[in-house]
Image: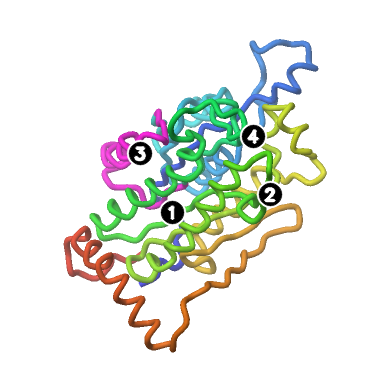
Amino acid sequence: MVVGNFLLAGKIVVVTGGGSGRFDHHRLEHSGIGTLGVSPTNFLPGINFAFVQQAIAARARVIVADLRLTAEAEHFFQRLTSESLVFARTDVTQRKDLEALVSLSEEKFHDVPDAYVAGAGVFEPEWSHFWADTETDDYASVSVNLIHPMKLTRIAVRALLGRNKPGVVLVVASTASMSANYAAALYCAGKHGVVGFVRSMGNADVDESVKVVAICPGMVNSPLWTACPSVAAQFSYSDEVAIGPEEVASVMMEMIQDKAYPGGTVLKVDKKGKAIVPFEERRRTGDAESLRLAREKSWGPVRELLKRERGVDEPMMTE
């Protein structure tokens, strides 16, 4: 049974990278006022923080999972008197931190989350950069951009099946998943990988009522660019081609809630608007029936495992 329409009112939502409101340092440098006593209007929200605000406005209960809250996010928490907003210090490269989000939800809201937004991401930071080559083992930026969405999805599936209820996972990817960039090889590789993962998870919507989708924003007027003028200059950031984080967040809300976006959907949003990214699946040769049997054979062990994780033979809970 597919998830279908999935209104967030009353639902529990986890958002990694949700504390991503970031001070506009460039604006500050030219204001002559320093960092103290700055009005929240001097801050620019990131995509995930904009989504948190919209989810709260839709009467969802939200767990913001991030390393820290920026000043704007702290102001938002202080202003909001509701108990519907919780912060969890989270390092998304640590599975135990991601697992703890489910436990926190059960503690605070007496249920596991209904929706999971894998929003945390980094763009070619100096500490994890292909060309800088400062790491000896794994690339930490790949752990953030690729591994964490996959781990969060697996945790989400197990949690939702354990409660026998439908849910949604939304991964924030990028239009970099549809292109290549010599100067940003790790970032592009991570986004290509996560889009392939989301497409591969499409059948979870039909089989398990867990919808996994991805949004691919183009250039966004967000801290990824505004907090790093040198990076913005290197990659030709321009306000003329960038869209606002609130616009991306609105499309994220739509993707989670609207049945028009089934599992496996990858949606691009940029200055030209939004569009589903087409995908032509390449399969091995053979007649339709033999291909169906081969698919069922390969999927069989997965379905048996997930049946055990659900632990019941009862029909799926519906809205």
Expressed as whole percent of the image width and height from the top left, the position of residue 181 reads 68, 46
Is residue 96 located in the magenta-colored stretch of the structure? yes
| Crowd rating for badge 2 (residues with CA inside 10 Å; few <14, some 14–19, many 20+) | many
The disc labelled 3 sits on which kind of residue? Leu
Q: Which portion, as a residue range, is magenta?
A: 89-117
In front of the other: 173 or 84: 173
Tell me whether the residue at label 4 lies in contact with that at label 1, contact meaning CB atoms closer than 8 angstroms.
no
Which residue position holds label 3?
Answer: 98
Which residue position holds label 2?
Answer: 218
Q: Secondary structure at mark 2?
A: loop
Work out which residue is located at the far right of the displayed protein and give it. 240
Q: Residue at x 56, y 29 (%)?
A: 133
Distance between the Cα atoms at labels 4 and 1?
Answer: 23 Å
Q: Secondary structure at mark 4?
A: helix
Precedes in sequence: disc 3 or disc 4: 3
The disc labelled 2 sits on which kind of residue? Gly
The disc labelled 4 sits on which kind of residue? Leu
